[in-house]
Image (tube, grey):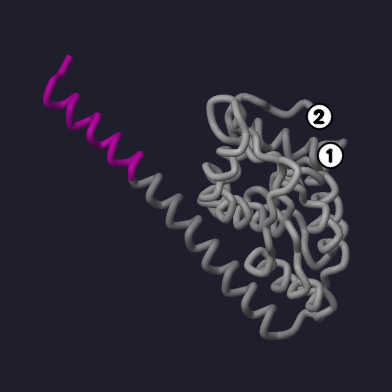
Amino acid sequence: LGVPCQTAEELVLIRLACLARVEDRSAYRQLEECWAALGSVERSTLLHHFLADGIEETAFVFEFLPDCVANAVRNPNIGLTCLLEILVCLLNMLQPAAPGLLANMSQCKLILVNLSDMSEFITCVRNRFVFETCVSRCKVRFTGGRVQLEMTGSNWARVNEPNSDITSLAYSVKDVLQKQRTLETQILQQGSQGFRTAHFFRTAETFPV
């Protein structure tokens, strides 16, 4: 692909490109757009997740994630950005339980999470809002040395719900709030950079060379 791979974010994008089976620059640009659509908090969570080594720090390995990515891209009601947001929700749910899960495994900081049920759900679900809230209706079981994510009947019962004006409005509001948070983060970063620059010049004036 000939894409840069120096920064942490660039490395994560390459990992996502592999998961999404990206084969050309056009598909990679679409991947970058999906990543950019995430909020700064979501990107930070995913950066930590995809760069965790499972040796010095706890790492979750999402089994069937490539299938989830492929199904999300094919489903016009979901898309990759929405799937990445759900992964953040899932990580936020699993991370507090990590110490208890690792207590049953010696000399190991890798936690396997089976997403096969979610992969099938992504193929069928017709309502974006139902998918965005599916983690709250999931159940988690620890069997055979891995975490099994079960979508449960509460999710499967809503798989054929069509998109409605209310769900579209809910997503629109969420999208606006997310863009507002991103803009606020950018403004704060620019303000911080401006402060450091001003401080440098004031220091240079006080202590001229």
What residue do we see at 62% from left, 77% from top?
170
Q: Crowding at label 2, few (<14), some or many (≥20) Cα neighbours within 10 Å? A: few
**Nearest the camera: 99 or 199?**
99
Q: Quick one: label 1 or label 2, which is nearer the N terminus?
A: 2
What residue do we see at 57% from left, 55% from top?
93
- The residue singled out by tag 2 in the image is 1
* Above-or-below relation of 120 to 69: below
> Amino acid type of disc 2?
Leu
Q: CA distance from mark 1 to mark 2?
A: 9 Å
- The residue singled out by tag 1 in the image is 22
**Nearest the camera: 121 or 181?**
121
**Residue 96, percent across and down?**
51, 50
The nearer-to-camera label among 1 and 2 is 1
Residue farthest to the left, as pictured: 206
What residue do we see at 54% from left, 62% from top?
178
What residue do we see at 75% from left, 64% from top?
151
> Amino acid type of disc 1?
Val
Contact? badges 1 and 2 (CB < 8 Å): yes
Secondary structure type for disc 2: loop
**Nearest the camera: 23 or 157?**
157
Magenta segment: 192-209
Q: Crowding at label 1, few (<14), some or many (≥20) Cα neighbours within 10 Å? A: some
Q: Quadrant of residue 135?
A: bottom right
Q: Is residue 5 left or right of residue 22?
A: left
For the C terminus, the image quarter is top left
Residue farthest to the top, as pictured: 209
For the N terminus, the image quarter is top right
Secondary structure type for disc 1: loop
**Residue 168, percent across and down?**
69, 78
> Residue 22: within the magenta?
no
